[in-house]
Image (spheres, rainbow, N blue to C red):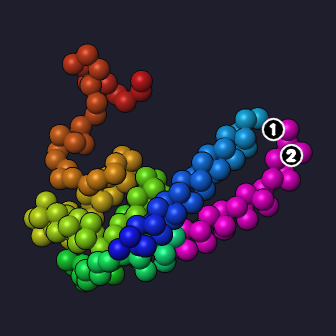
Amino acid sequence: MKHDRNIQSIVDQFWQSLENANEELNSFITSGMPSTTEKRHKPFVKKWNVMKEKAEMLCDQIEQSSLSVDPVEISLPWSSQEFSSHWQMWKDYLLEQHNRRMKSRMEYAALAQLKAISEDSEDKAIEYLQYAMAGGYQKFFKVTEKSYEQPTISGVKSDGDY
């Protein structure tokens, strides 16, 4: 068990170092370099992104092998291909937008919550996922008519130009 914690600590330190290096690189790239330099750094950025993906896969593998708990089996509440692809898009969105990876227990609970708030309606569930992604949210929630109203400024409805 102590060995597993040591491995996890090393993986966490490595991942933090990679995130810090990525932030520094992004800061450097967006700091306003000459256009000649921009052309030369694009191949490097592509290679860097491939390396990050491989590092993420490696960290996932190490993490999975050092877990002392077996993941729970996930079954989707609706068997349609449409829901399956929307659910995968939601998981990809969480990773891309919020750097959150769903592990099995989180996914199991999230699917149960989605089924409950959508009142067992696949169409509502997909709508809630789309609404959360469009709004940049980390969590999905029940969408009401009030959620779709235009924002107000000083109690007066606006036309959205502000």
Q: Residue at x 19, y 77 (%)?
A: 77
* Residue 47 sits inside the magenta stretch: yes
- Give the percent coordinates (x, y) of residue 3: 43, 73
**Marks 2 and 1, how far apart in space?**
6 Å
Residue range corresponding to the magenta coloring: 33-58
* Proximity of marks 2 and 1: CB atoms separated by less than 8 Å: yes
Q: Residue at x 40, y 67 (%)?
A: 5
Evaluate whether residue 92 shows in this view: no
- The C terminus appears in which quarter of the rendering? top left
Mark 2: few, some, or many residues within 10 Å (few <14, many ≥20)? few
Three-letter amino acid code at the position of disc 2: Thr
Evaluate whether residue 78 shows in this view: yes
Three-letter amino acid code at the position of disc 1: Met
Mark 1: few, some, or many residues within 10 Å (few <14, many ≥20)? few
Out of 98 and 35, give the one closest to the viewer: 98
Q: Residue at x 73, y 35 (%)?
A: 31
Q: Residue furthest front?
A: 2
Residue 152's quadrant in the figure? top left
Q: Residue furthest top?
A: 154
Out of 103 and 133, give the one closest to the viewer: 103
- The N terminus appears in which quarter of the rendering? bottom left
Residue 56 is left or right of residue 72, and the answer is right
Q: Mark 1 highlights which residue?
A: 33
* Residue 37, numbered label: 2
Residue 87's quadrant in the figure? bottom left
Q: Residue furthest right?
A: 36
Residue 159's quadrant in the figure? top left
- In the rendered image of this protein, does residue 101 appear above or below residue 57? above
Q: Residue at x 45, y 56 (%)?
A: 99
Out of 60 and 132, give the one closest to the viewer: 60
